Amino acid sequence: MAAKHKKKSESSPHASQSVTQLLRLPSGPVDLSKLDTASTPGYPGEGKQDAPALTQALGPEISDLQERLYANGRSAPEQAPRLLVLLQGMDTSGKGGVIRNAMGMVDPQGIQLTSFKAPTDEERKHHYLWRIKKALPDPGMVGIFDRSQYEDVLVVRVEQLVPVSEWNKRYDEINALEKKITDEGTTMIKCFLHVSFEEQKARLAARLSSPEKYWKYNPGDVDARAKWPAYQQAYADALERCNTDHAPWFVVPADRKWYRNWAVAQLLREHLIGLDLSWPEATFDVAAEKARVAKA
Amino acid sequence: MAAKHKKKSESSPHASQSVTQLLRLPSGPVDLSKLDTASTPGYPGEGKQDAPALTQALGPEISDLQERLYANGRSAPEQAPRLLVLLQGMDTSGKGGVIRNAMGMVDPQGIQLTSFKAPTDEERKHHYLWRIKKALPDPGMVGIFDRSQYEDVLVVRVEQLVPVSEWNKRYDEINALEKKITDEGTTMIKCFLHVSFEEQKARLAARLSSPEKYWKYNPGDVDARAKWPAYQQAYADALERCNTDHAPWFVVPADRKWYRNWAVAQLLREHLIGLDLSWPEATFDVAAEKARVAKA
């Protein structure tokens, strides 16, 4: 894995480190204002102009590795690993763009995508983790969470939808759930797409600048923006308190869309490599089946 | 639509006809042995070598058109159309390959994929169309059916899982369901991937030739192959009896994988163009929101 990565990024100033290492949030106190939103850690190109080619170039390898994962899920579901890409970030940080551009490189057959919105009436009747557990990826699959269990310590906290005593115990509950699912064979890639206050304003304005983008605009986003400091604090606490060895956070600088998309694709690639998968063994007698096909 | 298509395929011998027109099954009796499995109707290239570039070239337009569809689903779900790509074909005909290569060009957020396998215990308790209705695409979405309601007049008929009197009435029931869903705004693209008896043998043998492909091999496929004539007759009847104006069948020659993938991508493109969608209108006061963002 190290050798492969080195080859790919030898032109980078961080040639010796994977993007997984570079973006991993260090343990300890988190101050989001100290984490750069516009940097490009590990990016092997010169800038935006190289990004489409560099991102596209990851496609064939991601596709091959994901097919192995899927094949293991089909042939040996009992032992097959699972991958879960979890996306969080302020409005306009680009969760949708990442799914479209980075996750779009994966065969649709291998993806299980869930977008978590405000809970439905049905979901409200259950524990807040009920809908999360239902959406966990099957063996061999790449799950994608567009928002997640973290909304229950983010919007729920800032908008005071439950008492402090209620949301305050959720960090431990989330850690426990993540421990359980990673112990059971799911590798989590928790991505916080980190966008600046200024960039969010520019993106909201851009959505109002063209009829092609109106559908992405939600007046409620401006209301949430008014509570920016409270949301940043809620994010900082969620990142700090749920940054575990079994399910660490990756902070993806997201002011540059081209870097953000490349970086998440690269995280996916590196984690797929990390699974170190072989093609599954035949579940039938190959010689006997060859003879049957020859006669068929 | 015609003008746009003409521009794209002017090097084709069928430049005046869309792939939608070329692959549409004519009404009347169906004899599958008379329908070529290796031809390439409407293909604008010279052969296999051009296929990756020609198929990739469809990506940006499909992506743009699908985003419009999705945007309409988000902003105006009451009026937004839906698309349903239904894939049927003998084992090895390439349903999975089409999903991976053609449908893989669509944003995962805009896809609702359902693979219909042998019915589960839960599904067996219901009418055979119950699971189909549950999986129909939402407004603005591209549904993909990997197998479908047609299995209930194919495998069910050939394997005699229900009496003749039972499956024989299903053609009308399927037509009635398809009339209802197309009347309600779903455009169906029903694709029969037509592969030859010889090519199926070659593909089964190929799956046994390399450990990378073992996972795709299912010994049961050889059993089904022994009933080839019965399956072809069941397919012919399904195609003939369910080839309606509201939901016609497209017969995609599938012996050449590169043509098959290109052709389904092209069918998708042409049907998206046929929806003739504009970007949805703003559901808010644009000027007022611009002022709010400026101050936020």
Image (cartoon, coloured by chain):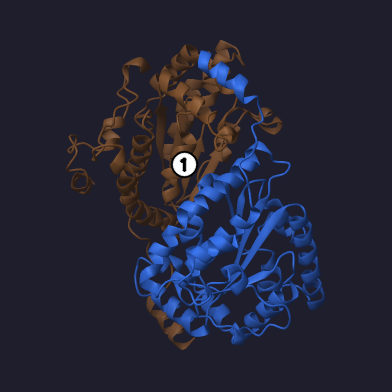
Chain colours: A blue, B brown
Would you say residue A131 is visible in this rendering? no
Locate residue A240, reporting x and y percent.
72, 77
Seen at 38% across and 25% down, the residue is B243
Q: What residue is disc 1 on?
A: B99
Locate residue A64, reporting x and y percent.
52, 48
Q: How many marks?
A: 1
Vertical relation: A67 (above or below) B25: below
Vertical relation: B274 (above or below) B226: below
Vertical relation: A187 (above or below) A261: above
Residue A70: quadrant of the picture: top right
Q: Residues within 10 Å of mark 1 (few under 14, many from 20)?
A: many
Locate residue A77, reporting x and y percent.
69, 41
Seen at 50% across and 44% down, the residue is B137
Seen at 43% across and 51% down, the residue is B106
Depth check, front residue: B75 or A173: A173
Q: Is residue B107 left or right of residue A66?
A: left
Depth check, front residue: A126 or A26: A26
Label 1: which secondary element: helix
Depth check, front residue: A261 or B66: A261
Locate residue A258, reporting x and y percent.
44, 70
Q: Is residue A279 left or right of residue B233?
A: right
Provide the chain ID for the residue under circle 1.
B
Instruction: Say which amino acid is labelled 1.
Output: Ile
Would you say residue B86 is visible in this rendering? yes
Seen at 74% across and 57% down, the residue is A182
